Image (tube, rainbow, N blue to C red):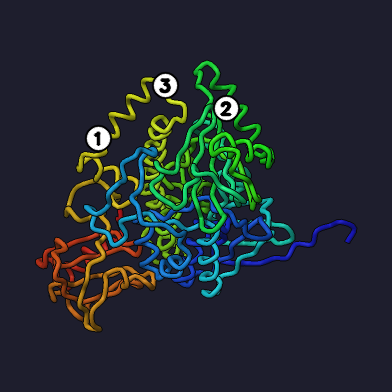
Amino acid sequence: MNGVTVLTESETEVVVVGAGPTGLTLAYELALAGVETLVLEKLPRRVEQVKGGGIQPRTAELLESRGLLEPLLERVTPGEPVGGHFAGLPVPLDCAPWHTRHPFPIAIPQWEIEEVLEERVAAAGTRVLRGATVSEVEPDDEGVSVTAGGLRVRARYLVACDGGHSTVRKLLGLPFPGRPGTHQAVLADIRLSTVSSLVPRQLGHMSTLMRRSGDHWAMLAPLGGDRYRFTFGHADPADPSDQADQSDQADSTRDSPVTHEEITNALHALYGPETTLGGVDNSSRFTDATRQLEHYRAGRVLFAGDAAHIHPPLGGQGLNLGLQDAFNLGWKLAAAVQGRAPGDLLDSYHSERHPVGAQVLHHTSAQRVLADPNPGEDVAALRDIFTDLLRLPDANRHLAGLMSGLSLRYGSPGGHPLTGRRAPDADLVTDAGPARLSTLFATGHAVLLDLGGTVPADLDLPPRVDLVRATCTDDLGAATLLIRPDGYICWAGDGSTAAGPTLVAAIADSLAKMS
């Protein structure tokens, strides 16, 4: 055709751009609701790099509610369970006070998370098209037209899950305000032929895996056998007057190849010359840039994961923030596509998740100071004080809830004290027998949980809301709970409102507000 590209026309309800953990989770959520979805991924094949290798407790709860956690647990990196961290300080975070069945972060390489999710997405009938680089995005009042290679797709909505350098965001010319990177580091999956006594033998708390020597800092995490995840950089003294130059340098060299020589030099500087590099499976560079979109929705285009926010990679927050974006957005977008949503439900994705993203940017910025690999006298003193604070149960509980996502509450305080909080995974006895609360959400439906036997059997519920009658030995704080598909309580009653028209009105109002 003399070099002329012939476009293949296609239609779908939703296009998801990006087949990372966020995009694949969203695609699965949409598939559960029966929404026709096409996933476009520019990479021809998955990069088998550890990257974000930790699932935080709240994310684990959400994955378990969809039956996605069990296959992931078969791929856990060997090691004893250990509490999370704040800024790498040597006090594990204790999630036990938050009453979760998953009190520890779970170490799983990101590419294995993606593999499991893509298998489930494919089994649900959703197509993932690889090697499809998006070149045009044209939104209008009715939908979005997308061009990727020789394919042109028309969809009702598009969700950009295509990372911190989002092509979709750039094509739409949306600003990505924030702070550029001032420091650069390397992440490499490596194999070691020989190791010194300084090399960690098993996974442990992050503070036990960190090492500094001269102008180098590193974290070496054993993955089993001779495989390690090696994160390292140079602890150059910070000079505020040079911040702009540092930012320019960090950004300009981010895409330069990582050489075996620099990996070897860092290994020898930190772990001795007897530590020998056997091979490099993959490597990349990253910076401590901090940015966030002002709006997660631009008409028919929405943003999730790193396409919406980036921050210093401290505490495994990025992967988990993106997955929780997807769980929040999926059921809302499905309801909008299928005409079941109240007018402002889809807008609640931004109003709920943008503050959560801003909070993560805020506390990772604080951690960035505390975790400075070349701390001055003042920062060293601050680390000592903060370490003492982490040993206080209330302070530890607060930061454990923050880092794990277990303390997240949607909406403003007011009304019933349970509204907006996550529903605990309680043991129930239903008409079908014993069950955990989390198992009621495998279909992606909302659940009206009747613990008092007062909800009328003939109650006319909205679509995709299941009535479950049960008893529970634990006091959940209410006789009737309306729980969203993402596991957050949007309405609670003590039994006095559990009468036909009144309850239906309360449910309808709760579904309309949601936040």
Which of these two is toward me, 201 or 243? 201
Say what secondary structure mark 2 lies in: helix
Q: Residue 90: give x, y in percent of width and height.
A: 34, 39
> Where in the figure is residue 295, as x and y percent of width and height?
46, 43
| Circle 3 SS class | loop
As drawn, is 394 to the left or to the right of 270?
A: left
Q: What element carries label 1?
A: helix
Residue receiving disc 1:
389
Q: In this view, does 63 lie to the left or right of 49?
A: left
- Residue 199 visible to the viewer: yes
Q: Which callout, 1 or 3, points at the residue further toward the start of the chain?
A: 3
Residue occupying the point 43% across, 52% down: 203
Nearer the viewer's eye, disc 3 or disc 2? 3
Q: Quadrant of residue 383?
A: top left
Using the image as rendered, state which of residue 424 and residue 140 is in the foreground.
424
Near mark 2 (Cα within 10 A), the count class, few <14, some 14-19 or many ≥20, is: some
Q: Where is residue 92 in the image (x, y as percent from the top left)?
A: 31, 45
Q: Going 49% across and 49% down the picture, which residue do you hit?
A: 221
* Disc 2 residue type (three-letter): Ser
Q: What residue type is labelled 3?
A: Gly
Q: In this view, does 172 lie above or below 55?
A: above
Residue type for callout 1:
Leu
Q: Position of residue 117 (x, y in %)?
A: 51, 65
Q: Which sits in the foreground, 502 or 360?
A: 360
**Which residue is labeled 2 in the image?**
247
- Counting every numbered tag in the picture gives 3
Residue that appears at 32% across and 68% down: 446
Identify the mark at residue 376; answer none if there is no mark. Answer: 3
Cα distance in 3D space between marks 1 and 3:
20 Å
* Residue at horizontal 43 percent and vertical 68 percent from the top: 68
